[in-house]
Image (tube, coloured by chain):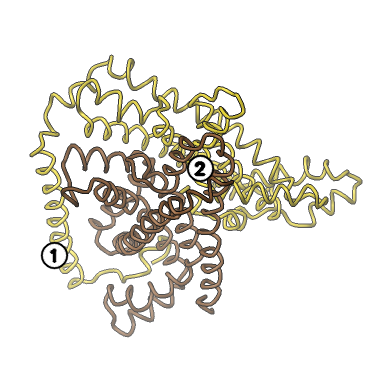
Amino acid sequence: MTGRGASVLYDVPGPRARLRNNVLTLAFGVVLLLVAYFVWTKFDEKGQWDGTLWQPFLRADTWTELILPGLLNTLAAAAVAAVLALLFGAVFGIARLSDHRWVRIPAAVIVEAFRAVPVLMLIFFAQYGGSLAGLVVTEFAAVVFGLTVYNGSVLAEIVRAGILAVPRGQAEAGSAIGLRKNQVMRLILLPQAVTAMMPAIVSQLVVLLKDTALGFVVAYADLLNAGARVVPANYANLIPSVIVIAVVYIAINLALGYLATWLERRSRRSRKIAADPAAAEAAAGGEVALMS
Amino acid sequence: MEAVVDELPVILGAFWLTVKLTVVSGVISLIWGIVLAAMRVSPLPVLRGAGALYVNVLRNTPLTLIIVFCGLGLGTVMNVQFSRDDLSLNSFWLSIIGLSAYTSAFVCEVVRSGINTVPLGQAEAARAIGLTFLQTLRLVILPQAVRTVIAPLGSLLNALVKNTTVAAAIGVMEAALRMKNLFDAHGDAIIPIFLGFAAGFVVLTLPMNLLSGRLARRLAVVR
């Protein structure tokens, strides 16, 4: 009865419960198969399982000519936006904890405002506002701008929560041995905060990667664009193509998700940091953070 | 500034659509998410597996891809129709399918984490008085679990409000797409229009956050 959370809800089954469970397993298995069969036949009626629609994905040139360029664009936008968002997050997260009111309050206003606005609106604004200012805003720049300020604001909150989760004694000890404020922040608080917040940071970067798909709306040539516009334009196979693209996205995100869990386990084990990773993560929103 | 005042009825109409998208898909994903959570903690491996598969697939797929699949895949290719003559109604409901399918996976995980916070003794006591698994879940575990996760559910709702803008990908005229149209119409008033729409989102999300914080404190299970 120990260990897994789920098993506390029911006893180890006896003979009758085992029989009942077996019957129910069979029943629900049949129901699930029926649902799957229904979906299968509906798609089949429209000829979506037709081999000719799936054939293109067995050929190398579909991947090298159409899909991989999109994937590279997605990864490029995600990488650039991730670096910029981390910088934005570190700067504004620390600024919100400043001792000076004229730094703290504007930083708080900026972070709260950008967190409240949908990424898609920021992308549109970058496109139109940029051309208003006489700049040529490429789709890439607009997507990176939207992802950077939104995710940067979320990361700022994560950094702030992480720094606040470091016990006060750490900063006090730093001051007691004569470190200046920026040394305390740079040498003592930030390293511990970042280690504690690492899982939350990686989760947010997964969100950022997923949100690059918004580039589709402004016709940025990303992975989703390859799957929903380019490949179907060549082979008229929208549903197979979107399914294949979804598998690629899921594989990348699952890999990053495992990285986050591994980092979390590692930071739980580590005794070098005084901040409690669980408390810090809860302060930053925990599980929910993954959604947007 | 005049542009915002002149177009106020249009802007309010766009936000009304955003609210409708949020409320309908919020209700559907709350119900479906709780069902999924129940599946994921059930004694039947087949239900646990199906729930886990659903959640892991949907959570790791970009929302834009799901909405595009619903709009173009289900709508255009599979010819799923909700209204024979009103195309905007069609894309409205197709985007609700996408939003609910995506959000429910997150609701499921939040509710499941709430179930884990209910003390072991509660479930044991429920079994000791002879309740079945479903009774235990419905009468003892879920009421406590949902009450402990009101604050995270509130943040999910907040995220859902912002996520409804993704419906723009299949041409639903909600706030973000309407804003883009107004940018096109009033090229000289981009900043006021943007600020107006941003303020609209703050107005939508702020009371919701306050309310969910208050509800969470009010309904907190005292242990």
Say yes or no: labels 2 and 1 on the same chain: yes
Q: Amino acid at mark 1?
A: Val
Q: Position of residue A228 (x, y in %)?
A: 30, 30
Q: Tell me which corner region of the image, top left, top right, bottom left or bottom right, holds residue A32.
A: bottom left
User: What residue appears at the point 24 percent right and 61 percent down from the top-left corner?
Assistant: B44
Q: As displayed, is residue B118 above or below residue A174? A: below
Q: Tell me which corner region of the image, top left, top right, bottom left or bottom right, holds residue A211.
A: top left
Going by the picture, which residue comes out furthest to the right?
A178
Nearest to the eye among marks 2 and 1: give it.
2
Question: What subunit carries mark 2?
Answer: A
Real-space Cα separation, disc 2 to disc 1, in angstroms: 39 Å
User: What residue appears at the point 16 percent right and 40 percent down from the top-left corner?
Assistant: B78
Colour displayed for chain A in the image of the structure:
yellow
- The label shown at residue A23 is 1
- The label shown at residue A260 is 2
Q: Quadrant of the N terminus of chain A?
A: bottom left
- The label shown at residue A75 is none
Q: Position of residue B63 (x, y in %)?
A: 38, 43
Q: Position of residue B145 (x, y in %)?
A: 43, 70
Colour displayed for chain B in the image of the structure:
brown
Horizontally, residue B133 falls left or right of residue B144, namely left
Q: Nearer the viewer, residue B55 or B178?
A: B178
Is disc 2 placed on a helix, strand or loop? helix
Callouts 2 and 1 close, C-beta under 8 Å: no
